[in-house]
Image: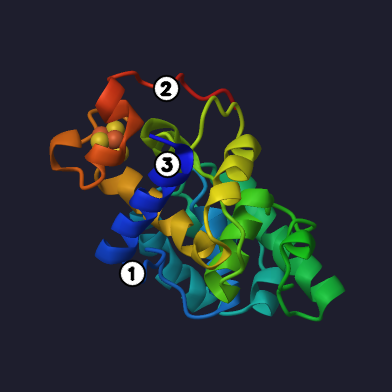
Amino acid sequence: MRKEERFRRVLAYFMETLPAPRTELSYINPYELAVAVMLSAQCTDKRVNQITPGFFGKYPDVGSLAAAREEDVFELIRICSYPNNKTRHLIGMARQVMAQYGGILPDTASELQKLPGIGRKTAHVLVSVLFNEPVLAVDTHVFRVSARIGLTTGAKTSLDAERQLVRYIPRDMIHKAHHWLILHGRYVCHARNPKCAECGIRSHCRFFSTGRIPPVRKR
Ligand code: SF4
C-alpha cells in the first residue's frame, strides 16, 4: 500500500470513530495543563489526575508555585515518577514565567521550550491542545504505533518520526493525530500484546499484514 493511501485510510478511520479527541489529563487553564503535562513524563495520566487536585488546591496559579518550597512540592508529587527533577522543573518553570513573562505562560512552542522542564514534546502538546497548533508531539505511544502501522519507516528518533508524520497529515488534523495515536497505543496497540484481533485499522496496518515488528526505538 502506498504511504499516502495508508495515511488516508488510517486518518479516515480515526476521524469517523473519534472525531474530537481530547487529552485525558484534567485541567482548566494553560497553567494547569502545563503542570499536568510536565508531571506526565514517564507517568500515567491516571496517576497525574490523582495528584493534580491536591496540587492545584495548594498552588492554584503560577505565582503561588513560584513562591513554593521544594520540600512541599515534592511531598505533593512524590507518587509521580522522578519527583525530584519534576519538583525543580515545576518551581523553575513558574519562577521563570513570573520573571520573564509577567506570570502568563508563553503561547508559542519556541518560547515554551526556554522554560525549565519543557522540551519539544511538552511544548508541542501544550500548543496543540491549547491552540490547535499544527504541531505533533511524538511520545513513546505515537512512536511505536506509527512505526507498526507503517506511517513511519525506519525512524530512529522522535524528531525523525515527527517529520515523517507531519509530511503526510493534513495541517488541520495534526493536533488531533497526536491524541488518536496516543489513545490507540494506550488502549489497543499496546507495547506488548497489541490487540490486533479487535483493532479497527488492522487492514491498513503494515505490521498486521506482514507480521514484521519494527525495530525497537533508539532514543
Ligand atoms: S493491527 Fe495490531 S499492530 Fe496494527 S495498529 Fe492494530 S493493534 Fe497495532
Check the image and name the residue furthest to the left: 197
Q: CA distance from mark 2 to mark 3?
A: 14 Å
**Badge 1 density bin: few <14, some 14–19, many ≥20, Cα 10 Å:** few
Residue labelled with disc 3: 141
Kind of residue sitting beneath label 2: Pro
The mark nearer the N terminus, 2 or 1, is 1
Q: Nearer the viewer, residue 191 or 36?
A: 191
Which image quadrant shows ligand 1? top left
Indicate the quadrant containing the N terminus: top left, top right, bottom left or bottom right. top left
**Badge 2 density bin: few <14, some 14–19, many ≥20, Cα 10 Å:** some
Q: Nearer the viewer, residue 185 or 97?
A: 185
Q: In this orientation, does residue 14 appear?
A: yes
Q: CA distance from mark 3 to mark 1?
A: 19 Å
Kind of residue sitting beneath label 1: Pro
Q: Nearer the viewer, mark 2 or mark 3?
A: 2
- Where on the picture, by quarter, is residue 205? top left
Residue 96's place in the image compared with 74, above or below, is below
User: At which x and y percent is residue 204?
Assistant: 30, 40
Q: Residue at x 56, y 74 (%)?
A: 130
Q: Classify mark 3: helix, strand or loop.
A: helix
Q: Nearer the viewer, residue 97 or 59?
A: 97
User: At which x and y percent is residue 46?
Assistant: 33, 56
Residue labelled with disc 1: 19
Indicate the quadrant containing the C terminus: top left, top right, bottom left or bottom right. top right
Q: Residue at x 86, y 72 (%)?
A: 100
User: At which x and y percent is residue 103?
Assistant: 75, 79
Q: CA distance from mark 2 to mark 1?
A: 28 Å
Judge from the rendering whether residue 185 lies leftward or rightward of residue 164; answer left or right.
Answer: left
Which of the numbered marks, if any, corresponds to residue 214?
2
Q: Residue at x 77, y 67 (%)?
A: 95
